[in-house]
Image (spheres, helix red, strand yellow):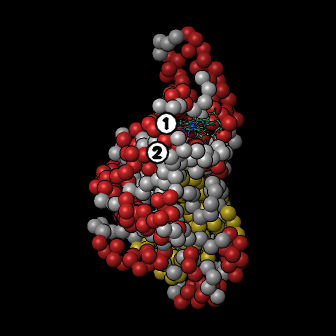
Amino acid sequence: MGGLARRATVARGDEPTSAVEVGQCLTPRTASNRASTQLREKDRVILRALGRMGWTAALPGPEEDDLALQASAGARTAKMEGAAPALLSGRGSRVDEVARPGYPPLRVGLIWLAADVFESEDLRGWLRAEIERTPADTWILLTHLPASSLRALLGAVPSIRIVVTSHPGVPTAAPERVGSAWIAHAGRKGQFLGRFEFTWPASPSGNTMPATFRDTSEALHLRRLRREYEAALAQADQTIAAPIDPAERYRLGVERERIQKSLSGLPEAVPAAPGEATVTSELIPLDRRVAEEPEVRRMVQDYIAGIERMNAALTEEDLRRDWLTEQGRTAADFASAPKYRGPASCKGCHPAEHARWSETRHAGAFKALEATHQTMDLECIGCHTIGHREWGGYFAPREAVKFANVSCETCHGPAGDHPEGGKYAAKEIAVETCLKCHTADIQPAFDFAGSLQRATCQGK
Ligand code: HEC
Ligand code: HEC
Ligand code: HEC
Ligand code: HEC
């Protein structure tokens, strides 16, 4: 959610048509139980923050519980203080006018296709009718249509010139071109902000989008690099001029030469000709270099501060019952499954393993949540404790403290009555055991052998 406050710094939807694609940001369909109270609250914060940024319309992704959203969108939006974007559902369109003094207003058409209408019979016919119904200077399509269907559709409906979509994987900065349309891929989950800008000369006679645009993304990138190198050079010169250690001065001199060489090697950015229509796209990483916008940051902090209060009320019995219902299993099944016992119950008989494990970072995983008061956060405890929402484990966030840390049974499986002398059905430790938490999002190149070495209970 730090990404949200950073996004607020970079992106303000100041234009009348400000629509945002919120795929993978809101509560997924599977979180249909009581435990989703927290996630619904998070949705509310996200939408309210987007509203504050000036976005007026939001399209949920295919993973989101769009039916529930549809049913409650009106009510939820109305309840929020401050303007939240209207949640777009199904399919629809609207045209907004952007006033431009001295020229006719620019009519921007927004058309959306939510996930649940992909199978619908005649999308082309519907799109064409929609576009003919209201005149607009340009049309923007917001959709998650699979890539192949999207391309086929664009071929058949040439009036659509801009598409905003998202597909899994790391997005590329370069916009994709299909016929006369440009496709901008949104990044995943607040890691990037894609900026995609069109300019074309104003004309008193009309606003029709030109057929060709010069792509100035590369030029923008080169100008940025040049500025960065120049700043680095100035910084190096300043440090070298100060009284410093001769060895350090020598190192900086070499570094300075390297930067100077990169700078001289940069190709010149070719600027657009005056009056030329341009398209520029860039991916802005929402990392620590981007400051968090204070207002949104406060909203996120208030939300986090409220999690403990919200989740302390959830009971083990209710949540377990919901989970068993989802699995189609009974309370008796749960009672007979081997239980998670925690590392304290192993220490007496396996002191060496316990001592070794205590030195690994796994042993401090729960502490990591304490600093930010997130020990009851449903979005964290699954990976920072043992047995959350698992056979023999626990369900209620208030129980998390009893299952604190990533410990023995994360790797060996629930011990059941083994500490009392029972046979341990210890599971084989394969890379899959780790990937449940060391996901590609967190560690894109997880090194199993090396990591196991650093985390195991064996050895020195
Ligand atoms: C009362 C002493 C005792 C306690 C307590 C105990 N163990 Fe053991 N453990 C043993 C003995 C003895 C063996 C070797 C015989 C066996 O495989 O049962 C063993 C074997 C194991 C093995 C190897 C199993 C295999 O398949 O080779 C693992 C893993 C293990 N214990 C983990 C744990 C964990 C985790 C805990 C705490 C939840 C724990 N033990 C608690 C006595 C204990
Ligand atoms: C999908 C599993 C997963 C979830 C969910 C998760 N974490 Fe983690 N977390 C990890 C892993 C794996 C690491 C260690 C990765 C590394 O060191 O690069 C980690 C590391 C951390 C660290 C230590 C970072 C450091 O450099 O010391 C903190 C703090 C943390 N997580 C907090 C949280 C909070 C707060 C949440 C909930 C908002 C959360 N985590 C949710 C898996 C997860
Ligand atoms: C990060 C994963 C991991 C964690 C956490 C972990 N172990 Fe292990 N453990 C291993 C691996 C790997 C082995 C080597 C044998 C194997 O592959 O099963 C092992 C082996 C063992 C064995 C069997 C030793 C033998 O001689 O056969 C015992 C007993 C054991 N662990 C106990 C524990 C206890 C007790 C804890 C917690 C205090 C713990 N382990 C935590 C990964 C782990
Ligand atoms: C239940 C979730 C979970 C599982 C499963 C898990 N880890 Fe971790 N791991 C974490 C968390 C959380 C941290 C960060 C703890 C912290 O620093 O506070 C972490 C940290 C680590 C670290 C320290 C960071 C680093 O990269 O040096 C290593 C090594 C590691 N895990 C290895 C493993 C291995 C190997 C496995 C599989 C055998 C595994 N983990 C399984 C949650 C998990």
Q: Residue at x 37, y 62 (%)?
A: 317
Q: Is residue 427 left or right of residue 373?
A: right
Q: Which mark is residue 341?
A: 2
Q: Residues within 10 Å of mark 2 (few under 14, many from 20)?
A: many
* Res. 310 image quadrant: bottom left
Q: Quadrant of the C terminus?
A: top right
> What's the mark number on residue 346?
1
Tell me if I can see residue 105 in this picture. Answer: no
Q: Is residue 84 visible?
A: yes
Q: Earlier in the sequence, mark 1 or mark 2?
A: 2
In contact (CB < 8 Å): disc 1 and disc 2: yes
Give the class, few, some or many, for how many residues have Cα within 10 Å of label 1's Cα (few <14, many ≥20): some
User: What amino acid type is highlighted by mark number 2?
Assistant: Arg
| Depth check, front residue: 432 or 234 | 432
Q: In this orientation, which residue lies closer to the viewer: 26 or 113?
A: 26
Q: Nearer the viewer, residue 326 or 193?
A: 326
Q: Locate residue 154, reporting x and y percent.
A: 67, 76
Please indicate whether residue 394 sits to the left or right of residue 158 in the image.
left
Separation of marks 1 and 2 at Cα, in angstroms: 8 Å
Disc marking residue 211: none
Query: Amino acid type of disc 1?
Result: Cys
Q: Secondary structure at mark 1?
A: helix
In which quarter of the view is residue 148 placed?
A: bottom right
- In the image, the residue with mark 1 has its CB under 8 Å from the nearest atom of ligand 1: yes
Which quarter of the rendered image does ligand 1 occupy? top right
Q: Position of residue 387 (x, y in %)?
A: 49, 51
Q: Quick check: is the Cβ at mark 2 less than 8 Å away from ligand 1?
A: yes
Instruction: Decide: is 333 above or below 368.
Output: below
Q: Pinpoint residue 311: horizontal percent, then vertical percent.
A: 33, 57
- Residue pictured at 62% horizontal, 63% vertical: 167
Residue that appears at 62% across and 73% down: 145
